[in-house]
Structures are given as structure tokens and as C-alpha cells.
Amino acid sequence: MTLIRRDEAGARVVPDDPWTALEDEAAAPAEGDVTVSLARFERELDDLRARPGRTGVRVPGDADPDAIGPLLAEAPLVTVDFPKFTDGRGYSVARVLRERHGFAGELRAVGHVLRDQLFYMARCGFDTFELTEGKDVDDALAAFEDFSLSYQPAADGTAPIWRRRAAEAG
Amino acid sequence: MYEYDRFDQRLVEERAAQFGDQVRRRIDGRLTEEEFKPLRLQNGLYMQLHAYMMRIAIPYGLLSARQVRRLAHVARAYDRGYVHFTTRQNVQLNWPALEDVPRILEELAEVQMHAIQTSGNCIRNITSDPYAGVAHDEIEDPRPYAEILRQWSTFHPEFAFLPRKFKFAVTGAREDRAAIAVHDVGIRVVQDDDGEVGFAFYVGGGQGRTPVIAPCIAEFVPKHDLVSFSEAVLRVYNRLGRRDNKFKARIKILVKQTGADEFARLVREEHAEIADGPLKLTDEDIARFERFFRPPPYEVLSNGDTKVGAALLSKDRAFARWVGHNVVEHRVPGYAIVNLSLKSADLPPGDVTADQLDAVADVAERFSFGRVVVTHRQNLVLTDVRESELRALFRELAEIGFATPNVGKLTDVVCCPGLDYCNLANARSIPVAQDLTARFADLSRLFELGDLQLNISGCINACGHHHVGHIGILGIDKQGIEHYQLMLGGSSADEASLGKILGRALTADEIGTAVERVVLAYLGLRASESEPFLETYRRLGPKPFKEAVYDAHQA
């Protein structure tokens, strides 16, 4: 698995992922940044916050973003799972977390994450991507340049194309 | 008509480049077929029985003469010299080579065309009333709104991997010619008591294996909320639509299982969150789109120029028939709407040769401001013809082969490609259409039958819209042998209804005779000569028709 980050500075490979996935039954390590399942996060909220390391939350693709949004607003990392690249629920989860619940931490796409979906994922608010094993990293890094414009608003602050035309026309 | 600016042009060019790269990665193996499939589908590329099939988008069915000529060129250069117009106002190439597709996209991009989202589990081409802008019963021209929705839905990042395909239709007229009741979302322009214009949203209609007439989930959505309300519908569907079973994944199943009222509540709740966001349209936004659809420079014609009545009285019977059946009233005095019938004995329904396309482009330029519209019944329309030029146009259309006076009649058959081309089909559909076209070739017999829609699908996916034909035929496979179910009473117009199966499935040899018997029974049963087939069926129900078809068979 290769981790890719995409922000104002462009797209690049992140060589060292600071996050360790903690299984539900495993004891939390004394220090270090961990991710936990949404269920565990809800259950052990206070204990996890008391730890010295940071806690990220793993959210399934079929989560209700309005139900979990307030809880996750302060999290440093949320991962959203794409069980299959053709399952598009995670796009809605991402947009609602970003646009409605003000989630400002790292939003990571995990699961079946392929090159040709990265452009859309980035527009919906994802900023890191766990590229599926065995996929060409250079191909993936180029994906964010597929289009130089978009018609509709999303989590990336793009204005509707008709508004941009009006602005140009003065 | 809408014209691309540099943004639109750049987008279709970048799309052609993107798809070219995807094809290269598929050919060198970096993309697996499983990974490539949704990508090629979202670019209109299907794997068919013999070859790829490529579907090209025609937003709300509107084409310029230049685009028609480019389609003719593409058909000659990359295909076998013909194209096929579909029931969603699109056009298909049946034999393109995969490696040619990026080049075809470039050629299309040069004339502001593309194949974006013509297939796949995304928002498809937005369809509309073929008489949009010229219909006498129009509240507002629906095309500016359809174009707004086209732009909003193009490469929408959130809705590219929906549970299933998603189809919008928009109409601005009082009479529904866009079949809004059998779309995932059907939008009708309405006016409230104060004269304010808005939209009624019908959500969850569809055909396929589970035909449903869409319930109305919002009777009046203010026009500034067109896009935000659509986004709310899509978000609810994307999140909650079923993904465990392809056959239960369309929004119609979600609406049914949730209940229309509860579904409407979910949409309203979502809409309340986003209504005042960036998707809210201003009057100025709408006006900008409306400018593209201003009426062409009509001449002011006196009543003396009105030749339709005269034509009907003309001694030229062929011309009079054609005017009577294929020409429709226009909202501007002295002009007429002319339907070009693509249903003749020579070609499968909806098929047009490259030479015919060139000829259509030519007559469109000379007779109708250079515009052509594709209808969901697989015909073409010239929307702005001077009545005084009808006779000259008729002669030219007759030479092209598009003047068969059968629009809205039994031989104006809607038909899918069927087992001759499609790998989903269970039975052939084109030969059935051709057999029936031959049986009813006698025009006076055809006219006696009045308005009668015959729709034929080669399988339950219902591409030939058999559920909403006054007479519908569905091809099925019965122990390896082609059979046909006969259904009656469907309609996609106002007061839409779904056809009901009449009785046991019929063989290929029986189906033509069965349709003839239905039609003969109708002639004997109708209350008067002015009672159309659909009304007779609705009045009497299936029984007398069933007896006519099946009792005769047993005898």
C-alpha cells in the first residue's frame, strides 16, 4: 500500500504513515497515533482522549455522516472505507463531513482506492489516499490533473461554473 | 441552442485525453477489465454481441446541422456507414473499434459533442420534450433548465458511482411528451396561483423488470432550487439506495420500500441543509442560460401564409396525408413543426445512414434554421418550418425516405436492437417490427387505426419501452425458443399507465397475427371512429382482446 497526500503543494507519496490501526480487541499502546473503529471511538472516547497519542477514526462507507459528524468534528484523522471502487457512498460521507460538520482534519480514502477515482475523491474532500496494493504510483499521482476545471461546487470550494462565467463577464 | 465557451470546450478535450489514457492503460494491462468497465461505460462504451457499441450524448435531443454532418462523417470513417437513434434522444455507433474511440471523441469534441455519462451508474443524458421552445402548450422552455442540470451533473464528483443508472427528463409543456412518469426523476414546469414558475418533481419511475409510474414527491419546488433539490434527491439515493442486488438498486425500489412520503421527507430534510448554499440559482443565472434558447428570427407571417388547411384540402393526396399525420401546430403563426419518420420498411427503427444524415443537415439548414431534434420515439423533428415551404420540404424528405406519414401510428414502432445486436436480449425485436411494418404498410388501413403506439423490447430491460406502448411486445426465452409476451394499455403520456400482459406468450410465427387480431378487435369495439385504441382498451379492459387473440388461435 502506498499513501498519497494531495494538498495545495500538489500530490506526493507520504513515505512514513504515523498512524497505526488498532483492532477493537487490542490494547492501546502507551504512546503513538492510532486509528480505531467508529464503534470503539464512541465507546472509549474519554480513555482515548486521555492517551498521549492522537486518535483517528475509521468510518465505514455506509455510515450516516449527519449522525457521526458532530462526534468527529475535532478528530485529527477520519478514514472512509470504499469496500469496492464502484461503491460511491463514501463520496457523500466525505462531503457532508467537510461541508456540513466542519471537519477540518485529515480525510483519508481507504479500501479499494484506484487511480481513476482519485480526482473525484479529492473534490469531495479527501486529502490522503491509500492506493490499492500493486497499482502504479506515478499513474495515481497524475490523476489529480485529469481536469483543469469542474462545473459544480463540492468540498473543494469550487464555485458553480455559471457563477464563474458571470464573474468573468463582469 | 447552447454553445460551448472555452470552459466547456476545454472540458470535452480533457475528457477525450483522459479516455485515451484509460484505453492505453487498459491495452497495456495497467487497468483490468473489471476496473476499466465502469470507466468505459461512463464514456458510453458497451461490449455488445459482436463488437463495442458507442453511445454519444445529445443533450435534450438538440443537434445543429454541423453536428449532424459530423455524425455522418464519424459513421463513415469509423463505423459501417449508419447510426442508430435511441429512445433517450441519444445516438449510437454499433461497430467502432476500441482503439478508434479516443479519435472519435476528439472529432466529436470539435463540434461540441461527447459521450460523457451516456452509460454507467451515473446521471445520464438529460432528456426533454422534442417540441421544446415551439410547443403551443408550453409554460416555459425546459431546455435552459435541462442545460443547467447537464452542467451540474457532468463529472459530478459525488454521484459518479451511484447504486445504478440515473435518468432525468424535463418538460415545460402541459402535455407530457418527455415520458417524465417513467424516469428516475421527471421534472415538470408548473405555475402556482400567483403565476410563479417552479417545478414538480416525480421521483422513482422506471421501466425495466420492475415498471413503476413515478409518484410526485414535491408539487412545487421554486425555480431557484432546481439544482439544490436535485442534489438532495441524489444524495439521499446515493447513501440509501440498495447496492446488494443490481435488480433492486434503482431509485424506484428505494422510493417504494421507503414509501413516497417518507422518501420525500428525507429529501426535504437534506434539501433544507443545502438550499441556501452555492447551488441556489439567481434570476441572472437562469437568464444567462435562457439567452442560448431565444427563438430564431421568425418572420412575421400573415394568416394568408397559413397553408396547412389548404394542404389538407389539396389534391396531392400524399402531401395532404403527410401534413395530416407528421406536421404539428407551432406556437408562431405561419410556422409548423415537422416530424421526420425514421420508420420505413427499409431500415430498422431509429437507424439512419450517413447519406441520410447529410441530407437531413442540408434540409435543416434550408428549412429550419439549421436545427434538428431527436425524439424519444426515435424520430427526428424540424421545429421551425414555414408553412409555405411545407410542400417543398415534403418532396425532399420523400427522396431521403423520411416522409412516411406514420408518426404516432402503429408502424411508428419503438424498438430496441434486440438479439441481432445486443447480448442482453432474449429474442429478436427488429424482425418483429419489420413484419408488423409490412402487415400495416397499406396507409389507408394504417390511418383508420388512428393513434396507436407499438413498442417492442427484446428482453425485460425494456429498452424498447414495451411497458408504455399502447401495444407492447416483450421478447422472452422459453426453453431456448424465442417467445413474445403481448401487453396492452400502456402509455407514457399524461395519465401514464403500464401495459398488462394479455395471455400466454406467443411464438415468432404467432405474434404478428396476434397484433392484427387485437387491431381488428379494436375496430369492431370502438365507440366511434374518433375513439383511439387506448381509450377503447381502458373502457373495455383486456377481455374482448384476449378472446380475439387466443380463442381464435385455439380454433
Image: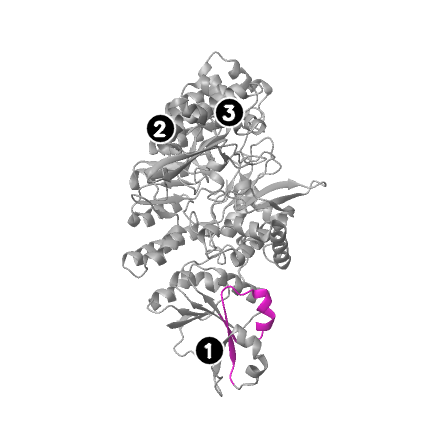
Magenta span of residues: A53-79
Query: Nearest the camera: B233 or B74?
Result: B233
Tell me what residue is drawn at x 47 percent, y 59 percent: A88
Q: Is residue B228 above or below residue B171?
A: below
The residue that label 3 is drawn on is B327
The subunit carrying tag 1 is A
Residue B43 pos. (x, y %): 39, 50
| Residue at 48% across, 20% down | B447
CA distance for labels 1 and 2: 65 Å
Question: Gap between marks 3 and 2, in whole Å?
Answer: 35 Å
Labels 3 and 2: the sequence-earlier one: 3
Q: Tags 1 and 3 in contact by the CB under 8 Å rule? A: no
Residue at which label 1 appears: A23
Give how far across and how far down residue B413 sits, in percent.
Answer: 43, 30
What numbered label is drawn on residue B509?
Answer: 2
Specify the label residue B73 is tagged with: none
Seen as rendered, the residue at the extreme left is B28
